[in-house]
Image (cartoon, rainbow, N blue to C red):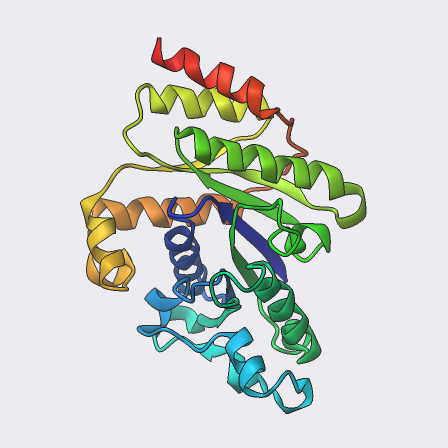
Amino acid sequence: MRQIAIYGKGGIGKSTVASHLSYTCADRGMKVLQIGCSPKNDSTRPLLDDFPQTILDVLRDKEFDYETVTVGDVVYESPIVFKNGGKVFCAESGGPEPGVGCGGKGVVEAIETLTRLNVFKNYNFDMVIYDILGDVVCGGFSLPIRQGYAKETYVVASGELEALYQVTNVSKVIKRFEVRSGAKLGGLIINLRRVKNELQMVQDFAQKIGTRIIGIIPFSQVVKECGGQGKTVFTLAPESEEAQIYTGIGDALLANKNLVIPHTIDFEDLYEWWLQYFE
């Protein structure tokens, strides 16, 4: 079973990447579990056509009586029919109400609940994909790396300073816990945002931290429209260039064996480096 974490700052497009990766894997005949690790429960919506009940909501409803929780309460099968017998299953961690808790708690509870239910051991998944906020200064969001669930991490980024900053934070977590967990960085997936000199910047940045770019997603109205309707481009625009791009990213990721311990950068040095592209 291959376990992959997809990180990135809020709004960078990591859930779109994760759901299209799940689709591509299932289209290749694989059995996939996608776990949305965010207080929002929208990571898996393009695969389910709905917002599923979150694991944290189920636990609250059952007053955290773990013995009464079943797999059917927290894991949902996608209705999408894939060729070659592929299947996608989905779970959403959920989170606390705004202002009354830590967002990472949902991730901790979700993984512990799925582990208690033996989901990882008993369901013979070929791929598990964690879709996670890049704010890894919160211990909950860094859990898949720290505890060795995801040996392979990818970060969705752009030329925006905030997006690159999240890459540096994720890199620091990987470097800190690699010996204990075996986690490594598989590369960057670039979602272009029309920043000045952006393509050159992200290529230089990948080289600077010692990793590679797995794929580049141009700014696209098609992706935005499909996402707004809660669908993948594979469903609404299967013949589009965007569908080919996401397929290519999925295939490149599946073939990737170039996993590294990334170099790390302090924020001040990152900022000084980033400014040069605007001179």
The residue that appears at 44% across and 23% down in the rendered structure is 203
Q: Is residue 139 left or right of residue 98?
A: right
Quick check: 105 above or below 197?
A: below
**Position of residue 200 measured from the top left corner of the image (x, y, whole percent):** 38, 19
Q: Is residue 259 visible?
A: yes
The quarter of the rendered structure image containing the N terminus is: bottom right
**Position of residue 100 measured from the top left corner of the image (x, y, whole percent):** 54, 64
Q: Residue furthest bottom?
A: 68
**Position of residue 183 measured from the top left corner of the image (x, y, whole percent):** 69, 46
The residue that appears at 53% across and 21% down in the rendered structure is 270
Splitting the image into 4 quarters, where does residue 25 fall? bottom left
**Position of residue 22 measured from the top left corner of the image (x, y, whole percent):** 44, 60
Q: Is residue 219 left or right of residue 83?
A: left
Splitting the image into 4 quarters, where does residue 232 fall? bottom left
Quick check: 155 above or below 148?
A: above
Q: Is residue 44 left or right of residue 172?
A: left
Quick check: 249 above or below 120?
A: above
Using the image as rendered, state which of residue 144 and residue 100 is in the foreground.
100
How many dots with numbers?
A: 0
Using the image as rendered, state which of residue 265 and residue 86 is in the foreground.
265
The residue that appears at 60% across and 40% down in the rendered structure is 170
Quick check: 32 above or below 257?
A: below
